[in-house]
């Protein structure tokens, strides 16, 4: 089941150049399972026409408070009451000011005032408009009124300037909406996750790696973030975007991943903010070349074959499990046979409380998977589903097993 399956989102589009992103946002919300209806301000229609949103959503688009398609003449009531969430993207400085002061002079602002459900806005404006004291006061007032602000981000702006005020990309807004509807099972928790392969160099142009795409690890990072956790993702080389709201630390080799993981854990302990969980999803190379060549190894003749000597890489998961005050450790095992037997052997060998096993070679790079969750006494089968769905189920399972959060120091 998709995260937003059956949810009704009323998407408000106000008059900013970022309105073009709202078209992609409508599509992404639908891909996540939501039913989307659009209400636009008159200024919003100057940037994107109503026909675009009607074609994308398959739903009528509303602009006029006196729209005769609403039989009782109360579009502001009917539209707001049927929505599980009102989401305004983009939300201009003008619209934020009107919402902060309870003004209701068009359909969108009126239905926001008449709503009895949640409201979220994605601000979008020039950096100076965003940083203006009046806009900042309005933002604080909206937050105090229980309105969720999604963004803004920082970056290049249509005016040619660079800075804060840029509307977040549609994917990031959808992630925030998904998090809104996902139970905060990990609220206040800190989770450290590894994902992807490692790459062990032989010489400047050759190396040893594996077929891991990182999709499962990234899906788990996304699910942890949606569940309310602060997430740090130590990632090997992958062709994936970092999930919104997740801090990613890119690494290449197993030694780099080992050092990055322990550095993050050390920093958390030193700051009095230890990590609650460590989920080792990365497919870490077991061996590396003992002597990496500084120059490319040349083929001298048709029969020449180099001899490579290997040494073992450190066991990252076992080393974390052995730490004093170790976080709750979850391992992953990609097996080619005897899934439960090999998984249980690894569970005992690593000295961890939970292990997730799967048949590896056939799942690398795919968008779906099937998992077997193992602890000391039982096993739980998760049938084949998308990796996002499996990640959500797995995170819920992990959340029930985490020990109580430590009280912060006084």
Image (cartoon, rainbow, N blue to C red):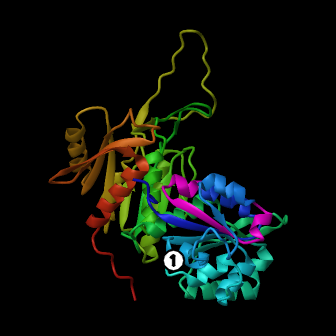
- With respect to residue 103, does 83 lie above or below? above
In the rendered view, tell whether residue 281 sits above or below residue 361. below
Q: How many marks?
A: 1
Identify the residue shown where x is 62% and y is 61%.
Answer: 60
Say if residue 67 shows up in the picture. Answer: yes
Q: Does 261 lie within the magenta span? A: no
Please say whether residue 229 is visible from this viewpoint.
Answer: no
Question: Looking at the image, which is closer to me, 391 or 386?
Answer: 386
Question: Dot 1: what SS?
Answer: loop
- Residue neighbourhood size for the residue with mark 1, other residues' Cα within 10 Å, grouped as few (<14), some (14–19), many (≥20): some
* Left or right: 11 as drawn, with respect to 181: right
Foreground of the two, 256 or 373? 373
Q: Nearer the viewer, residue 54 or 366?
A: 54
Percent from the top left, x then y, of residue 263? 47, 62
Give residue 105's position: percent from left, percent from top.
71, 84
Residue topped by disc 1: 118
Give the magenta-colored segment's residue range: 27-48
Q: Position of residue 319 (x, y in %)?
A: 34, 55
Nearest the eye: 305 or 95: 95
As drawn, 331 above or below 200: below
């Amino acid at each position: 089941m998709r995260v937003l399956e059956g949810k009704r989102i009323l998407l408000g589009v106000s008059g900013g150049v970022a309105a073009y992103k709202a078209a992609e946002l409508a599509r992404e919300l639908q891909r996540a399972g939501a039913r989307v209806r659009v209400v636009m301000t008159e200024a919003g229609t100057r940037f994107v026409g109503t026909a675009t949103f009607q074609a994308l959503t398959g739903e009528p688009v509303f602009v006029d408070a006196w729209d005769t398609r609403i039989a009782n003449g109360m579009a502001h009531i009917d539209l707001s009451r049927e929505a599980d969430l009102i989401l305004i993207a983009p939300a201009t400085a003008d619209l934020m000011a009107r919402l902060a002061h309870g003004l209701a002079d068009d359909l969108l602002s009126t239905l926001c005032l008449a709503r009895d459900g949640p409201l979220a806005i994605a601000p979008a404006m020039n950096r100076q408009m965003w940083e203006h004291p009046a806009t900042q006061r309005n933002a604080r007032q909206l937050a105090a009124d229980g309105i969720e602000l999604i963004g803004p981000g920082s970056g290049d702006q249509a005016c040619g300037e660079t800075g804060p005020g840029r509307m977040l990309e549609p994917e990031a807004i959808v992630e925030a909406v998904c998090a809104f509807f996902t139970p905060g099972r990990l609220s206040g928790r800190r989770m450290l996750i590894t994902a992807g392969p490692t790459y062990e160099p032989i010489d400047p142009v050759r190396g040893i790696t594996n077929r891991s795409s990182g999709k499962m690890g990234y899906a788990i990072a996304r699910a942890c973030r949606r569940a309310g956790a602060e997430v740090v993702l130590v990632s090997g080389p992958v062709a994936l975007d970092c999930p919104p709201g997740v801090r990613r630390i890119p690494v290449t080799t197993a030694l780099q991943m080992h050092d990055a993981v322990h550095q993050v854990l050390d920093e958390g302990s030193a700051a009095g903010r230890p990590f609650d969980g460590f989920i080792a999803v990365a497919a870490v190379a077991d061996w590396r070349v003992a002597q990496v060549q500084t120059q490319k190894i040349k083929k001298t003749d048709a029969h020449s074959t180099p001899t490579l000597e290997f040494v073992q890489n450190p066991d990252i998961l076992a080393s974390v499990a052995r730490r004093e005050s170790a976080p709750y450790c979850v391992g992953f095992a990609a097996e080619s046979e005897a899934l439960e037997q090999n998984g249980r052997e690894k569970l005992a060998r690593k000295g961890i409380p939970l292990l997730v096993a799967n048949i590896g070679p056939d799942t690398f790079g795919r968008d779906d998977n099937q998992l077997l969750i193992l602890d000391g006494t039982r096993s739980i089968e998760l049938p084949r589903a998308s990796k996002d769905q499996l990640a959500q189920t797995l995170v819920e399972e992990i959340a029930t097993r985490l020990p109580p959060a430590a009280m912060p120091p006084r």
